[in-house]
Amino acid sequence: MHLEPALPGGKLAENVVHFARVLRAAGMQVGPAKVLDALNALQIAGIESRDDWYAVLAAIFVQRREDRELFDQAFSFFWRDPALLERMMQLLLPKVYGRAGGAEEEQANRRLADALTPPHAPKHDRAREEEEIEVAAELTFSADEKLQRIDFEKMSAAEWQDAKEVIARLRLPLPEIRARRREPHAHGEFIDPRATARASLRTGGELLRLKRARRTRRTPPLVVLCDISGSMHRYTRMLLHFVHALARSQGARRVPVHTLLFGTRLTNVTRHLRERDVDVALEKVRTAVEDWAGGTRIGPSIAEFNLRWSRRLLGQNASVLLITDGLDRDSPEDLKQAMARLKRSAHQLIWLNPLLRYDKFEAKPAGIRAMLPFVDAHLPVHNLEALRDLADALSEAQRARA
């Protein structure tokens, strides 16, 4: 099938730039360099057929496996009509809002609809009806409160951007513990002989007042083990934003936050997440990780952590955040042994599980049953409200352990 000119006059560059903007607004990593590469590649490959267009643009713009479906939908909608945005929306909206499909397809369609809809375009009738019903039912339920409870998997592109800005401002008050070191204090529980002796030199060796000290308090290190398998990849991106904000929010305390990702293998990305710009940091993480959105081997990954990283990272009463859905096909006995050793090494072990968003969640999979006995807390991690509750959970687990 031959492709007709996208616009009168054959404005190839304008069409490609417009298409790249749509992809970027929908959440894909598309920059000016890729647009130039696409234009050069199209001139070399030719534009006689639609298949050639698709192959060239997909090779340039699709860098992640999870973006393939979004690109396919955008390509189908965008290049179908030469009138671009106005006539595209006439074709797009009935399919975006009226087509029944799985949660993954619905999420991709919603992000694509937001990217293609101009800012001045009226909202779809069904979207307006749902908004009116929700406002009538909850009355004073503000937009910020609504954003707190939206599942990361169901967020639109605009909601996704708002959530990232909220996470960037999020401060997690990590619990403090008493350390062995002491500091001077007027009403401390310990007598400081050295400070008392120094003070007596001013009075000719006569002890007029005992100097006292108390134990210092410090925040222990935090180790994050995050699952990046196919079943978790829609949550992993937002959770990495959270980990980046957590590492950058400690300020002068400089609390060590170590992050390791695992799918079929274990990768330490702590150094990459130290970048000030979160987008640069995540791009470096995606480059360093080879098994993004692939399979999962929870047991072997935790066993590798116990063998290679446990002694280095779990000293000084470090806490562990284990982020995974617990869906593992390997032997549950091996997973149980790995979790038991991790539990003995960590000061506290918190499991964050997005499957807890379901009200009727039951621990039926063998992997989940093998992990549950060894965690101090089992919490949901599917929206902003769950991330805010994490601070209370860490403090509560600390008090329970004490």
Image: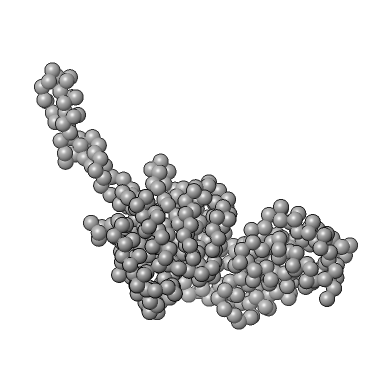
Residue nearest the observer in this picture, 140 or 254: 254
Q: Position of residue 101 (x, y in %)?
A: 59, 80
Residue nearest the observer in this picture, 254 or 85: 254
As drawn, is 157 to the left or to the right of 118?
left
Q: Position of residue 364 (x, y in %)?
A: 38, 79
Screen quadrant of the N terminus: bottom right
Q: Residue at x 18, y 29 (%)?
A: 194
Residue 100, above or below 122: below
Q: Residue at x 61, y 67 (%)?
A: 65
As drawn, is 99 to the left or to the right of 83?
left
Asked which colour scheme the image uses, the reply is one colour
Q: Position of residue 8 (x, y in %)?
A: 87, 65
**Outermost residue toward the right?**
9
Residue 226 placement: quadrant: bottom left
Instruction: For residue 235, say whether it is visible.
Output: no
Screen quadrant of the C terminus: bottom left
Number of numbered discs visible in the structure rendering: 0
Residue 307 placement: quadrant: bottom left
